[in-house]
Amino acid sequence: MKRGLVGVALVLGVAAGLAACTGSSGGPAMSSDSASGGEAQMAPAEAAKPGAEADQSGEVAPVKKVEQPGVDRKLVRTANLALSAPSVAEVVDGARGIAATEGGYAGREEVREESATLTLHIPSDRFDAALGELSELGEVVSRDQTAEDVTEQVVDLDSRVATQRASVDRVRALLARAGTVEEIVRIEQEVTAREAELESLTQRRQALGGQVAMSTVTIAVSRDDTAPPPVETEEESSGFVAGLSDGWDAFLGAGGVLLRVLGAVLPFVLVLAIPGVPLVRWWRRRRAAVANAAVAPAVPQP
């Protein structure tokens, strides 16, 4: 009896152990399913990054990027300014001082007592401020400015410089592996040609960058007490008096032309008259002698 109870107890113990093993194996499977479900739930959250945003339906929509025109544009700016002032020299000195204060310099100058023209080169970031200060040096007669967008040219030159530099590096690598004198000479010629092209592109890029960095202002200054040119009125330019005046001017013009022609021809006449007059006289005497001999009566023969 005791052995039967012991056997039953062993069977129950084995069954309990199998049940425990089965329960433990089911636990990880459920945790795995729950983990995959958690990843599925986290996926939309991870997808909602700065570049996208989720709407109420749960779908992820991309964030619209705001375009900003004019950002980092390469502009070549120029201006023409005409001023009138009592003293031309004071305006010129003031313009030089403004250019130096703003970090620029004065270029070509033509200064006279009654007028002056000078070219100023000013940093582009101080262009507007400097142009305002220059306009206050005198009375503004005219003012205009332009801005040329050279962004595409700058980008194109940068790309071509980078490509040409890489090409030079490749050819130099071939030169290092050259095995014969003929190969070395041929590759060196190619290196020289490509380096010259690279230098040309680099110089063009630097020149364009200088135009972008420094703006140009051309100033024309005139003294304000200079008398303006006379303007003819309608009464003065019409009527009998105006016609008579125009006719007299035309007559004087024609006379002047005739006198000028006569003055140009007279030296040739004098030079040709010196040998020509004796020659004409001799020719006339000869013709007269021939004519007399022809009309003279024949002398009778004995």
Image (cartoon, rainbow, N blue to C red):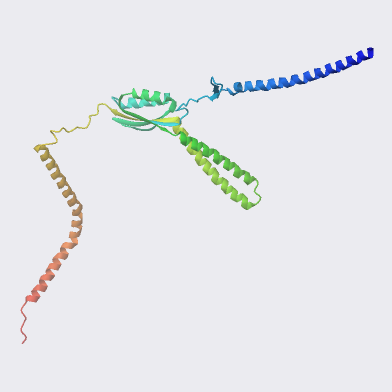
Residue, x 56% and y 46% (percent of image)?
A: 192
Q: Residue at x 87, y 17 (%)?
A: 11
Q: Is residue 97 visible?
A: no
**Left or right of 202 on screen, residue 109:** left
Q: Is residue 29 left or right of residue 182?
A: right
**Residue 267 visible to the viewer:** yes
Q: Residue furthest top?
A: 2
| Horizontal and vertical percent position of residue 121 | 41, 30
Residue under the image location 48 percent in, 38 percent down: 204
Looking at the picture, tell me which residue is in the foreground, 49 or 151: 49
Left or right of 138 in this view: 49: right
Establish if 245 lies above or below 36.
Answer: below
* Residue 117 position by quadrant: top left
Query: Where is the N terminus found, in terms of image quarters?
Result: top right
Q: Position of residue 170 (x, y in %)?
A: 60, 43
Residue under the image location 19 percent in, 62 percent down: 275
Point out the residue furthest to the front here: 1
Q: Position of residue 123 (x, y in %)?
A: 44, 27
